[in-house]
Structure formats: structure tokens, C-alpha cells
Image: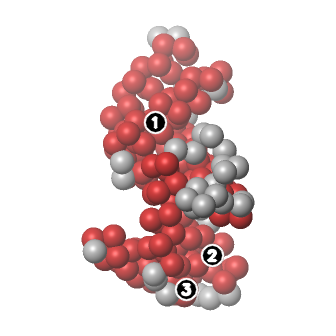
Amino acid sequence: MDKCTLFETELVRLQGELYWFAYKLTANKEDANDLLQDTTLHALNNKEKYMPGSNFKGWMFTIMRHIFINNYRKILREQTYMDTEDTNEAGKNINAPSEISPDMSCRVHDIRCVMNAIPQEYASPINMYVVGFKYQEIADRMRMPIGTVKSRIFVARQLLRDKVKQ
């Protein structure tokens, strides 16, 4: 089997696992499908980098995680941009970028409200974790033991779940 065929075979074989990972990251079927599509497209655009016998699955999951983190950061940047702009009388941003859908703005707003409802000592570590910092990086930046970071992230997840259920 040639390199190209092997790449495509492995890519097709992983689609189910990649979808479930995407769903775990996004918690939304449509967003998971979009993330899967973006990941697959990125892999196809970079298939010349594929080496038979390498950890293809790890490479694909890493691509997906990075795309998810970059998309999350983009949403936060755009939301910050929207929050700092002048608004019209209905409270809508008159200078908002056109690619932000009302659904996306609403979800980001809801997430911010829930995040603001948990104590800062838990919100800071989970925010850093979500945008891609490793536990050790968070511990170093916050000057606390790694066990405390893990504990606070665990508690933050529990608090967020409870708040979302309300």
C-alpha cells in the first residue's frame, strides 16, 4: 500500500473516534461536526508530512485539540471586541464583525455569566486550563502546588456543572 492510500485509510478509520473527541470538546453535535471537518481538512492539507508507522492517531487528536483551542481563543477575542465597542439603543453592537452569529454571542455570554458566578480562586485555573495551559504551567504562573491546581480545576468543573443545570 502506498503512502497516500495508507494515510487516507487511517484517516477514514479514525473518523468515529475523532467525532467523539470533538463532541467531548464542544458538547454540541453541529460544532463537533464542524471541528471534525476542520481537522480532516487540515490533515489532508498536510498529508505530505505523514510518515507511515508514526503515531497518526496522536497527530490527529493534537490537530483537533489545537483547532478547538484556537477557535475558543478567537471567540473570546471577538467577544472582548464586541464588549468594548459602542452599542446602539437595543444593546446590539453596531460595529460587530459579521461572522459572529447571534447564537455564538449568546453562548459566549452564557458561559461568561456562569464563569462569573464561581469564585475567582476556581475560575482562574479553569480558564487557563481551557485555553490550553498545562497543569504545571498554571501552577507556575499562579505560584501554587500542582495538586492545588488540579483540585481547583476539579471543583470548578463541579461548580460549572451545577450552575449549568440550574
Quadrant containing the C terminus is bottom left
What's the CA distance linking mark 3 and mark 2? 14 Å
Residue type pointed to by label 2: Ile
Per the image, the residue denoted by label 2 is 138
What's the CA distance linking mark 1 and mark 3? 32 Å
Task: Residue at 39%, 24% (x, y): give it.
Answer: 12
Residue 141's place in the image compared with 6, above or below, is below
Residue 120 got which mark?
3
Residue 63 in which image quadrant: top right
Badge 1 or badge 3: first in the primary sequence: 1
Residue 103's place in the image compared with 157, above or below, is above
Residue type pointed to by label 3: Gln
Can residue 107 be seen from the camera position used here?
yes
Residue type pointed to by label 1: Asp
Per the image, the residue denoted by label 1 is 34
Q: Secondary structure at mark 1?
A: helix
